[in-house]
Amino acid sequence: MPIFRVYTVLDKEKNDWKVVNNPNHNKIKTEIATFMKQIIQVTSVVPRLEGVFRKDRDLIVDEKKTIELSGSGVG
C-alpha cells in the first residue's frame, strides 16, 4: 500500500507542455517529514517486543526447568 502518490500531468494551458507535479515538491517534503516524525514517535513509545516476549519465555522456561529438576514433573 503506498504511503503517498504523486501525479504528473502535462500542463494543458501552455504550449511548451511542461510537467506539473500534483502535489508539488514542497507539499511532498512537508508530508514526508510529518510522516517520519509520526513513525519515529510511535516506534519510540512501543516497547521492544522481542525483550517482552523473551522475558515471558524465560519465566516459563525457568519454571518448567525447576519442576523437572525437582522431580515433581508429570510424565
Image: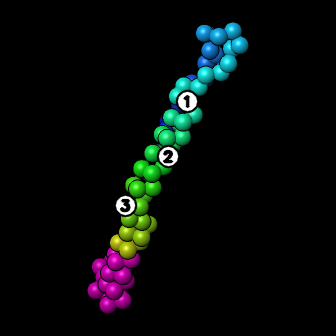
Q: Nearer the viewer, mark 2 or mark 3?
A: 2
Q: Which residue is mark 2?
A: 33
Is 16 placed above or below 7 here?
above
Q: Residues within 10 Å of mark 3 (few under 14, many from 20)?
A: few
Looking at the rendering, which quadrant does residue 40 occupy?
bottom left
Considering depth in this image, is 49 or 37 the residue closer to the camera?
Answer: 37
Tell me: residue 52, above or below residue 43: below
* Magenta-drawn segment: 58-75
Residue neighbourhood size for the residue with mark 1, other residues' Cα within 10 Å, grouped as few (<14), some (14–19), many (≥20): few
Q: Position of 29 compared to 50: left or right?
A: right
Q: Amino acid at mark 3?
A: Val
The residue tagged 1 is 24
**Percent x, y of residue 28:** 53, 36
Q: Main secondary structure of the magenta part?
A: helix
Q: Measured from the top left, where is residue 71 in percent x and y? A: 32, 89
Q: Residue at 61% x, 18% y: name it.
A: 9
Relative to 21, 65 lies left or right? left
Residues at discs 1 and 3 in contact (Cβ within 8 Å): no
Q: Position of residue 26 (x, y in %)?
A: 54, 36
Residue 54 showing in the rendered view: yes
Q: Which residue is mark 3?
A: 45
Location of the C terminus (image quadrant): bottom left
Query: Is residue 57 in view?
Result: no
Classify mark 1: helix, strand or loop. Answer: loop
Q: Secondary structure at mark 2?
A: helix
Compare marks 1 and 3 and give the one earlier in the sequence.
Answer: 1
Secondary structure under tag 3 reads: helix
